[in-house]
Amino acid sequence: MFDIFLSPDAWVALLTLTFLEIVLGIDNIIFISIAAGKLEEKDRVKATNIGLVLAMLLRVGLLFGISLLTALNQPFLEIDTKWVQGNISGQAIILFLGGLFLLYKSTKEIHEKIEDKEHDAKAVASGQSKSLRAAIVQITVINIVFSFDSILTAIGMTNGISENPTDSLILMIVAVVISVLIMMLFANPVGEFVTNNPTIQILGLSFLILIGFMLTTEAAHLSELVIFGQSIGSIPKGYLYFSITFSLVVEFLNMNIRKEK
C-alpha cells in the first residue's frame, strides 16, 4: 500500500507539494485570522485551529471526490475533423478544466497581490463576526474557496507518478496533512517569513501557472489529441521539478544577498 514511498520521484513530489501547500495555505491562515479577529483571545485561537482542521478535512474529502472523477478514463466522445482528432474522456475534461482554473486563479492572485494587495483581506474583514459559531461558518466558506487550487495542484504534481491511483491519493493526503500540521504548529513564524518575503508567494503562484499548463497538456495527451497533424505528448515531471527547484535556489540566494545588504 505504501510502496509509492520507495520511489525517489514520489519523495521529490511530496516535498515540492508540501512546500506549495504551505505557500498556498498562508493566505488561508491570514484570512482565518481576520475572520476570527473580533473574537476573544481564547476563542480566536480555537477558531483558527478549528479552521485549519476543517481545511485539512475538506481538502482530503475533495481529494477523494476529484480522484474518483479523474479515474473516468473511458472515452465517451470521439472527435474526427480535418484539423482535430481525439477521444475525450471524463478524466481529460476534469484535468483540462482544472488546468484552466489554475491558470485563471494564479494569474488573478498575482494581479491582486501586486495591484490590489488588500482586496481579499477587505472582503473577509467586512464579514467579521463576534460569534464563535458564525466565525467558524465564515472560515468554512473561506476554506472551500481556497481548497480548489490546493487540490488541483496536488493532482497536477502527482498525476502519472504511479500507475496505481491509490498511491497518488496517499501521496496527496500525506502532503496535505503535513502542510496543515506545520501551519498549526508554526503558523506565526511561517506567516511572518512569507509576509517578509512576498516573492515566495509570487513564486508559488507562478508554479501554479506551470502546473495548470501541465494539466491542460496532460488532458490533451490522455485524449490522444492530434491538432493539425501534430500529436500532443505528456510533459515529464522532471521538467517541473527542475524549474521549481532552480527558481527556489535563485530566490534563496537573493534573500541572502538582501540580508547581507
Image (cartoon, grey):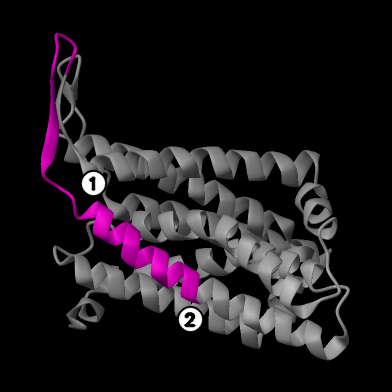
Q: Residues within 10 Å of mark 2 (few under 14, many from 20)?
A: some
Q: Residues within 10 Å of mark 1 (few under 14, many from 20)?
A: many
| Residue 167 disc label | none
Label 1 residue SS: helix
CA gap between label 1 and label 2 equals: 27 Å
Residue found at x 32% / y 73%: 171
Mark 1 vs 2, N-terminal side: 1
Quadrant of the image for the N terminus?
A: bottom left
Which span is picked out in magenta? 57-84
Residue 149 falls left or right of residue 201 = left
Label 2 residue SS: helix
Circle 1 is placed at which residue position? 91
Name the residue at the bottom extreme.
42
Q: Image quarter for residue 163?
A: bottom left
- The amino acid type found where label 2 is placed reads Ile
Q: Is residue 161 above or below residue 247?
A: below
Give the x, y percent position of residue 109: 65, 45
Quadrant of the image for the C terminus?
A: bottom right
Give the x, y percent position of residue 121: 80, 56
Residue found at x 61% / y 77%: 52
On the question of residue 176 being in view, the answer is yes
- The amino acid type found where label 1 is placed reads Gln
Residue 27 falls left or right of residue 10 = right
Q: Is residue 27 above or below residue 235?
A: below
Q: Nearer the viewer, residue 123 or 246?
A: 123
Whether 228 is among the magenta residues is no
On the question of residue 256 being in view, the answer is no
Residue 246 falls left or right of residue 121 = left
Residue 182 falls left or right of residue 215 = right
Circle 2 is placed at which residue position? 178
